[in-house]
Image (cartoon, rainbow, N blue to C red):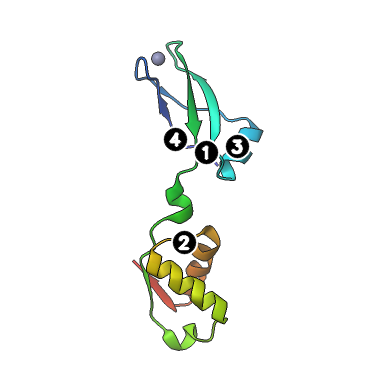
């Protein structure tokens, strides 16, 4: 996957697209902060911290249960985590995957 994030040189404002080593990319994908040393096209060296945007992992969730009959057939624990994430508006990647499946099944609607 491509890193969409670009960094601006603090000296001249030129945009620099970081190139990640496989190790750095793995760390980035795991949600860790990665320290990068960059050089802009004009030769200014600077360091940045690259971190996956939190929005991708815990974006706001605006969902509601549409089909309570089928929702109530889910395991108790799943019902609970889903209701909690709907109330709090935040969902971890695994809950998002679960919500996606429920959305496809028409049990949950998200806006
Ligand atoms: Zn520069």
Dot in front, 1 or 2: 2
Q: Residues within 10 Å of mark 1 (few under 14, many from 20)?
A: few
- Quarter that holds the C terminus: bottom left
Q: Who's the residue at 50% across and 37% down the image?
A: 3
Label 2 C-beta lies within 8 Å of the nearest ligand 1 atom: no
Q: In the rendering, at what x and y percent does residue 92 appear?
A: 51, 59
Q: CA distance from mark 3 to mark 1?
A: 10 Å
Residue placed farthest to the right in the image? 23
User: Picture quarter containing residue 41?
Assistant: top left
Question: Which callout, 2 or 3, points at the residue further toward the start of the chain?
Answer: 3
Q: Which residue is mark 2?
A: 91
Q: Which residue is mark 1?
A: 2
Q: Residues within 10 Å of mark 2 (few under 14, many from 20)?
A: many
Does 101 appear above or below 68? above
Residue 20: numbered disc: none
Classify the position of ligand 1 by quadrant: top left, top right, bottom left or bottom right: top left
- Element type at mark 3: helix
Q: CA distance from mark 3 to mark 4?
A: 13 Å
Does 48 appear above or below 100? above
Q: Which residue is mark 4?
A: 5
Left or right: 63 in relation to 81: left
Question: Which callout, 3 or 4, points at the residue further toward the start of the chain?
Answer: 4
| Foreground pick, 78 / 17 | 78
User: Picture quarter containing residue 63?
Assistant: bottom left
Q: Which residue is mark 3?
A: 25
State yes or no: discs 1 and 2 in contact (Cβ < 8 Å). no
Q: Who's the residue at 53% across and 68% down the image?
A: 98
Does 50 appear above or below 92? above
Q: In the rendering, at what x and y percent does residue 51 appear?
A: 50, 38
State yes or no: discs 2 and 3 in contact (Cβ < 8 Å). no
Q: CA distance from mark 4 to mark 1?
A: 9 Å
């Amino acid at each position: 996957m491509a890193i969409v994030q670009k960094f601006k040189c603090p000296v001249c404002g030129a945009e620099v697209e970081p190139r990640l080593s496989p190790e750095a990319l793995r760390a980035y994908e795991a949600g860790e902060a990665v320290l990068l040393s960059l050089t802009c096209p004009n030769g200014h060296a600077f360091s940045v911290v690259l971190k996956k945007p939190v929005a991708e992992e815990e974006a706001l969730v605006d969902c509601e249960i549409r089909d309570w009959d089928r929702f109530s057939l889910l395991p108790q624990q799943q019902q609970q985590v889903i209701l909690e994430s709907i109330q709090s508006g935040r969902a971890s990647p695994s809950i998002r995957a679960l919500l996606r499946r429920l959305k496809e099944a028409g049990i949950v609607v998200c806006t």
